[in-house]
Image (spheres, coloured by chain):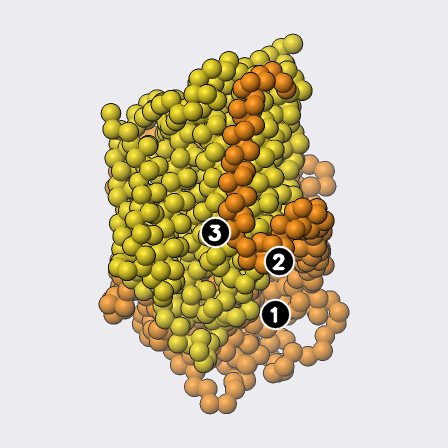
Amino acid sequence: MFPYLTALVVLPTLGAILVKALGGRSRVREVAIGVALVEAAVAIAMAIQFNPDRAGIPQLRETHSWIPQIGASWALGVTGLGLVLVLLAVVLTPLVILAAWKEDTDPVRAGNYLALILFLESFMVGVFAAQDLFLFYILFEAMLIPLYFLIGLFGGEQRRYAAVKFLLYSLVGGLVMLVAVVALYAAGPGGEQGFLLDNLTGLSLDQNAERLMFLAFFVAFAIKAPMVPLHTWLPTVAQTARVGTTTLLVSVLDKVGTFGMLTLCLPLFPHASDWAAPVIIVLAVVSVIYGALLAIGQEDLLRLVAYASISHFGLMVLGIFVFRQTAAEGAALYMLAHGLSTGAFFLVVGFLAARRGSVSVKDFGGLQRVTPVLAGFFLVAGLSALALPGLAPFVPEIMVLVGSFDGARAAVVVAAAGAVLAALYILLAYQKVFTGPRPEGEAAAIPDLSWREKIAVGPLIALLLVLGFLPGLALDVLREPAEAAIAPVVEVANVEVSE
Amino acid sequence: MLSVTWLAIAAPLGSAAVLLLGGRRLDRWGHWLAVAASTTSAVVGVGVMADLLSRSDRAVQQHLFDWIPGGELEVSAGLLVDPLSVSFLLLVGVVGTLIHVYSVAYMEGDPRRRTFFAYLNLFVAAMLLLVLADSYLLLFVGWEGVGLASYLLIGFWNQNPPFASAANKAFVVNRIGDVGLVLALGLMFAHLGSVDFAGVFASAPTASEGVLTAIGLMLLLAACGKSAQFPLQSWLGDAMAGPTPVSALIHAATMVTAGVYLIVRSGPVYAGAPTALLLVAIVGAITLLFGAVVGMAKDDIKRVLAASTISQIGYMMLAAGLGPVGFAFAIFHLITHGFFKAGLFLGAGSVMHGMGDQVDMRRFGGLATLMKVTWVTMGLGWLAILGVPPFSGFWSKDRIIEVAFIGEGMKPWLLGGAALLGAGLTAYYMSRLFFMTFHGKGRWTEGQHPHEASALMTVPMIILAVGSAALGLIFAIGDSFVTWLEPVTGHVTHEDPVLAVPVIMTLTLVLVALGIGLAYRQYALLPVPETAPVASLAVQAARKDLYQDSVNSVLLEYPGQTLTRTLVFADAKVVDGAVNAVAAGTVGLGGLVRRLQAGRVRSYAAMMLVGVVVVLGIVILAINGKGWF
């Protein structure tokens, strides 16, 4: 069969090299978006090959010997969850490129930016498809390279500080995880395919060793899916980096954190997951409330969306670590819904920034009368962030809250209050930016969304609506992966109870 | 028509989408599309009722599509067509259509009239989804949908900053109630294994009283938010910022009664939760007095009507809190109230229309002869809400007072007493409104020429006035409405009240007469000052809504703002500060930070390479030293 996943990993990198090689001479933007669209088409072709009835087991597998000396294989494959996140990545990338069309006047600089974005896409796809722990780790770390340059070279005033902060956080998490990766390999069967996930699952580990390894993985993932108190890099990056970078980072790449928790932490370390769950649930709920309260207090819209995301990641982590079927399905669906919702939100805020050179609510007011379409897009994106029914995040949020009730009642009661806070941070921001008397002077001449901008965000809004009414489209392939992820922990917990 | 019940929701939803996406080319006729969509809902409502009446089985469940398929939390999008939902379908369809027609004229000069009608259609669709849904989860979709429409319409003129704040307040306070509904869903799923009506009601009798009480209380919290019941009533007064037809439709006749619907619909849950039910009645009793007291002191005509709505819904909640014996009367009053309160609001809109958007009743007076239609239609609404026989309120409200007196111990005396007292207060504040507006001397500001509105506005007012006058009597003949609802509320043979019925009726009418008399003397015979006179502390408190906003500020807003500010500071200085300190404090990393900040990006690239080499090195070492851990 056609090696879809390898093609999906390699294609954007080749595209990146091409874009860079063009050196700004000709139409780099058109080439870049063309590559991204081909990538999306290939991904959709792959999705058609995917058998939804067996969504729990990795499909479209390719296993090749890679570095047999150390037991590493080039092993790719996607479960339903991996598939959905790959699709999210390939849908968002062309939209981000389109939204950034006019960001650089210098074609060389534009080429550099777009090459990095495409390079990043390779890693985004690879990391969700890796079926070899070593490969996963390499991709997990290597995606820092394009991100570091995307943040450090293209962005606001504090971009170097932001890039270093992001890097240090990620490296700390990554290095801690590396120790555990190696240790897990050592505990496994070894051999030329010793890093294959299949060979590392279901090992009987020493209790303390398992707990330490679990913590090492968890810390790395908790930095990615920013959990309080490991979150402070995100607001800094969001505030500083280009909106396109932040969109891909928060909508897709940070999902590696929750994806890793669900598909690696739980099956690889079931005892330790069960052991750590009470503390993690508390931290998750703290993230929900803390992120929401901080979002209310922000004047910078990009920081606001970042803190709101911290709150939402808290809900996903809650859904993962209560080990209940409905909640885990909800967490998986939330990863997709949040990607669409936050992606739309960041891009719309980017449009505001492009018009005003500022994203501080102080610099706006009354824009609804000047740019009604922009206001409408902002409101829909905002309403999706507050999980309004009819938009994609509602069903997963309800599934997490309702599904966790049985296992973590107190946590749900506190987390549900986040809904009130979400209404506050979204509507207050809308009020400050868009309501009030029609502005005068420069602000009165702000143009409404162009066709290019509408096309960049329109598909996301449409997907938010479609998944709001027909969440089954995604849920049907997420149910089994969620079940497979929590099954080992549920089994362990049952054994403990019966003992 | 039964098979196309979904069309009642789809028509206004589709119309809203067309109006929002269609752009300016629809400005000329878009409002008529909205009227047609709303009319479709009303027609479907009539057809569905006819179909239902011809059946012996009065509850039809319709599956539309799989919403959340498979899994443990399987929910389909389905409708439950029964006498309760159809009553609402007709109320929303008929009153909604009349208000759509009225709005065509009322919003004529507004450049965003098309958007207004899109939102109005969106509201109708969401409200019908709320009442027709066959599960609590789908109900929740409508529940938040009407909240959104309400937010958009309260803030329709949000170029005015206080109006934008009022919209936010409504949404946020409602969300507090919504948390209750989410938690109720969690309780149902965890303990009853289902979130649809059929499943919940089937398991409820076997569930423990503790669980049912918890669900009942959470549903009550939700109802308090949506229906502006104590202690979540504060948003409704401010919601009058919306255009008057919105106040009539959403904040009087339909949306705000959704809480009552929720309680009555959840009857099987409350059947096992007497404590929760008692609390529903108590909340209703407190709110009916609260609203009435505030209504007596307000000078803004719309705010009087808003306070009155809070109070009247208090009556409905009180009735719902009495259990099956009160359920039917709660809905009965809900329907008649929907007609007369919508009529009163449209009348107020007509007065404002004729008086250059003036809302201060102290600047009205003597309008009876100049605005005859408005005077007569509002007069009928006034008599209806007072409960003067034979107008609508007499048949619905007086029955609530009567059943409130049923029971043992202190309960009937307290609840019945509150309901009785409320009737007197209602008579006073509504008569005050009526006399201040239409009688006495004109106290208009200069340059005003009060005039009657066009037929597009007066015809809906007349139809609603006819309903206000006659609906109660029609429903009461042979207890037809109560019998119609019996498949939902159950057949109840109720005990006698602690006071004889004729005594209660006489007392009520005496109190109503007293209220009218006092108001007549003060506001029709004596001159009304153009500015509010200095008043006693009690009146001042009532003018300020019994300090509801101050209480909320002290309890929630100020502590919340302080907490948020503290956290923003702490996050930047303490959490992030620690991170920066660790980074800078570590000599090696500190140096790296400085070098990188100085722009030597290449040095990082080199480090990355070193990192990868180290990774590989460690791994290779690990192979050779397997088992070192």
In primary-sequence order, the first of circles 3 and 2 is 3
The answer to whether residue A43 is above or below residue A112 is above
Residue position marked by numbered label 1 in the rendering: B298
- Which quadrant holds the C terminus of chain A? top right
**Residue plotted at (71% across, 70% down):** B540
10 Å crowding of disc 2: few (<14), some (14-19), many (20+):
many
The quarter of the rendered structure image containing the N terminus of chain A is top left
Q: x and y percent of residue A44 in the render?
A: 28, 37
B73 shown above or below B506: above
Residue A276 lies left or right of residue A442; in this view the side is right
Whether residue B238 appears in this view of the structure is yes
Which mark lies nearer to you, 2 or 1?
A: 2
Chain B painted colour: orange
Report the residue at 70% width, 46% height from top: B586
Q: Which-is-in-front pick, marks 3 and 2?
A: 3
Q: Which mark is residue A149?
A: 3
**Residue of label 2:** A297
Element type where label 3 sits in the image: helix
In the drawing, does residue A146 fall left or right of residue B505?
Answer: left
Closest to the observer, A280 or B156: A280
Q: Secondary structure at mark 1?
A: loop
- Tell which subunit mark 1 falls on: B
